Image (cartoon, grey):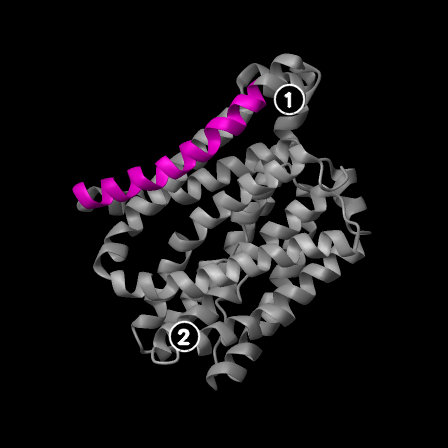
Amino acid sequence: MEKLSKDLSLLDKLQPVFLITSIIIGLIISKIFPSFSSKLVPIVSIGIFLVILLIMISVDIKGILNSFKKWNVILIAIIINFLFTPFFANFLGIVFLKNDPGIHVGLILYLITPCIGWYLVFTELADGNVELGIVMLAWNIILQLALIPVYMWIFTRKVVGLDIASILYSVGIFLFIPFILSRILKGIIIKKYETIESFSEKFKISYLKTIILGIVIISMFASQGEILFQNPLIVVKMILPGLVYFITIFIIALLVGIIFNLRYKDIALLSFTLSARNSEASLAIAVSAFTNPLIPLTVVIGPSIELPILILILNILKIIKRKGVYKN
């Protein structure tokens, strides 16, 4: 266990540099090999699938069932994600993008769709409550399907439909299939290595997850780099409202943790389920319901601004955990 603790300490030191370097490598690949970069898109989904599968192996079903009882955290997340965030996103658009209606709508679309996969990855990396994260995913999907059309009508007076099949496909790929496979693999691992901890230590699973995430980030930025380089003005206009959003949401998560005396694991989960956004559902709406090309472009560019901030939040949370600001 002492050896594992030292490995994790080394990983904590190397991880932020590695992930940021992955972003830079992805952008360089996009610039030097643009034709090759587009072929890396499938690696993003495959990599996220593998990381979530490795996370699920350590998940306890009893922990998931117990997480349904954490109504205080669930209600806080729902209120912020589905009542505060849509109006805050529209407010940011009014303040920062009043002369850019297309980017304004794209910003709203991007920010009102909670993430399906990313937040579980970052929650686990921050040693957050993954079991509660799985429970939150169900709520996020149900409320997303119910409320996104409502908010798009309120803010844009546009009737939009959701690609339910696409959302359910993502849920199947990033939740149900990894969960089923993880149960099978967990039984095999325990039979051979007795504990998941022994298996994780032997095969350096913490390092493996970080390496796979790095490959995902490289592939993501390589495949989207051309869009970023061709539309620098949109990127610049998105940075300020994006920063205000993510910083505000993270501060709210930390303050809520203090006010409601939450444990660190729940605060880490709350930070990422409120911060991480999902561009799949929003991109489908942007492409099918709007003719302004700036709207889907804004939605596509959003994750490129978000990901470095999620990495920063991850490392701030690790510092908070080491200093013992919140109870474990």
**Where is residue 229 shown, x and y percent of the image?**
23, 55
Q: Amino acid at mark 1?
A: Ile
User: Which of 137 and 261 lies nearest the eye of the viewer?
Assistant: 261
Label 1 environment density (alpha carbons within 10 Å; few <14, some 14–19, many ≥20): few
The image's mark for residue 235 is none
The quarter of the rendered structure image containing the N terminus is top right
- Residue depicted at 61% across the width and 51% down the height: 271
Judging by the rendered image, the residue that carries numbered circle 2 is: 104
**Residue 187: within the magenta?**
no
The quarter of the rendered structure image containing the C terminus is top right
Residues in magenta, as a range:
7-32
- Residue depicted at 44% across the width and 49% down the height: 307
Judging by the rendered image, the residue that carries numbered circle 1 is: 188
User: Which of 166 and 33 lies nearest the eye of the viewer?
Assistant: 33
Seen as rendered, the residue at the extreme bottom is: 157
Task: Report the predominant secondary structure element of the magenta stretch.
Answer: helix
Q: Quadrant of residue 294?
A: bottom left
Q: Quadrant of residue 148?
A: bottom right
- Residue depicted at 44% across the width and 66% down the height: 241
93 is higher (above) or lower (below) than 10:
below
Counting labels gives 2
**Where is residue 164 shown, x and y percent of the image?**
52, 65
Q: Which numbered disc flags the more N-terminal residue, 1 or 2?
A: 2
Indicate the secondary structure of the residue bearing disc 2. helix
- Residue depicted at 76% across the width and 44% down the height: 263
Indicate the secondary structure of the residue bearing disc 1. helix
Q: Quadrant of residue 43?
A: top left
**Residue 23: within the magenta?**
yes
User: Which of 11 and 223 lies nearest the eye of the viewer?
Assistant: 11
